[in-house]
Amino acid sequence: MTERRRDPITGQWRIFATDRQDRTFLPARTECPLCPTLPGHPSTEIPEPSYDVVVFDNRFPSLMASPPAPSVMRTDLYEVEPAQGATEVVVYTDEHSASLGDLSTDRIARVVDVWADRYDQLGRRDEVAYVFIFENRGEAIGVTLHHPHGQIYGYPEIPPVARLELDTALAHLGAHGTCVLCDVVARERADGVRVVARNRTFMAYVPFAARFPYELQVTAHRHATSLLDLTDPERHDLADLLRTVTRAYDALFGFPLPYVMSVHQAPTDDGEWLAVSHLHVEFTPIHRTAEKLKYLAGSEIGAGAFINDTSPEQTAADLRAAVPRSNLERSLACP
Ligand SMILES: [Zn+2]
Ligand SMILES: [Zn+2]
Ligand SMILES: [Zn+2]
């Protein structure tokens, strides 16, 4: 069964993909399907002896170009649709034990170029309304493969979190005549207390009302609507700040910090959202200390009201102290 069902109570579409239960789960290093194919060994997903960045269709897709018919009949109350869309895997490097922050800025910029290209290509498809680039990192987040990689989903409608942000930004535009993220970036630049690192094009800060301890947003200073809207030097600046942020995360507690990374940008079906689509990358690590995790519980799951046990101004200071020195100096030298 692979299909989309609409929850009539919240109006949200949910995806069902039961075949994914059998997907490869934490294989031994020698069995890694994302490593290059070695001479004389069985072929992995990537039949090359070495590579930089590779994109391919997820072998266990939850959304697809030609999905099967739904397993149940649609009624007025219970809407069901085929799971149309796309799911792709982006492998960052052929080095099994590396992570995004281990790569050079030039190499990360190649990953950013690939993201921008897939945003363009998937966004052109009729069945895709929103391209979502993300990475799940660490066993605590539930990754099933350790090899450094991220994913791209092409959803047939704007997914709930992006929709909520866009609707809120639209209300802000109506009330103030400005883009809310343009206002947020200006305010963070002026306040400074929650800023962790910055360069010419992007700024990394702990959000004023962060959901998670050590949550970060990496946001373009200017109103860039998507990765496609960035010039080459701006993409390089994004790569630079992604490198700084992920290295700070790994230095924070002395181990690779598990997180979810989400790229939020403009929906791809029409231009009506451009005035309120402001490119940003969200990092949500789930640790609140080296040993303790932030679990989603009653208030978060049952009521949707996040309770944060840390102060965003303090976690920003902690993260600033974890930024590698060379990056910090460059960052302070920036306007
Ligand atoms: Zn591998
Ligand atoms: Zn903006
Ligand atoms: Zn967002």
Image (cartoon, helix red, strand yellow):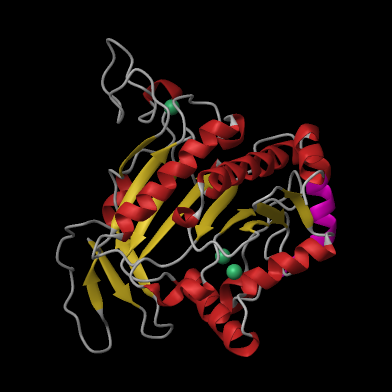
Residue 256 visible in image: yes
- Compared with residue 279, is residue 164 higher up or lower down, i.e. above or below? below
Q: Image quadrant for the N terminus?
A: bottom left
- Compared with residue 66, is residue 266 higher up or lower down, i.e. above or below? below
User: How many discs mark residues in the rendered view?
Assistant: 0
The residue lying toward the viewer, choosing from 201 and 314, is 201
Residue at the farthest top position: 40
Residue 332 locus on image (x, y percent): 82, 45
Q: Which image quarter: residue 94?
A: top left
Residue 169 locus on image (x, y percent): 57, 78
Residue 309 visible in image: no
Q: Which image quarter: residue 12?
A: bottom left
The residue lying toward the viewer, choosing from 61 and 71, is 61
> In what quadrant does ligand 1 lie?
top left
The residue under the point 84% across, 43% down is 321
The residue lying toward the viewer, choosing from 51 and 232, is 232
- Compared with residue 265, is residue 58 higher up or lower down, i.e. above or below? above
Q: Which residues are magenta?
A: 307-320
The residue under the point 27% across, 10% down is 40
166 in the magenta segment? no
Q: Which image quarter: residue 125?
A: bottom left
In the drawing, does residue 321 fall left or right of residue 166? right
Q: Main secondary structure of the magenta part?
A: helix
Residue 26 locus on image (x, y percent): 44, 35
The residue under the point 51% across, 69% down is 277
In the drawing, does residue 280 fall left or right of residue 114? right
In the drawing, does residue 248 fall left or right of residue 232? right
Residue 309 locus on image (x, y percent): 78, 63
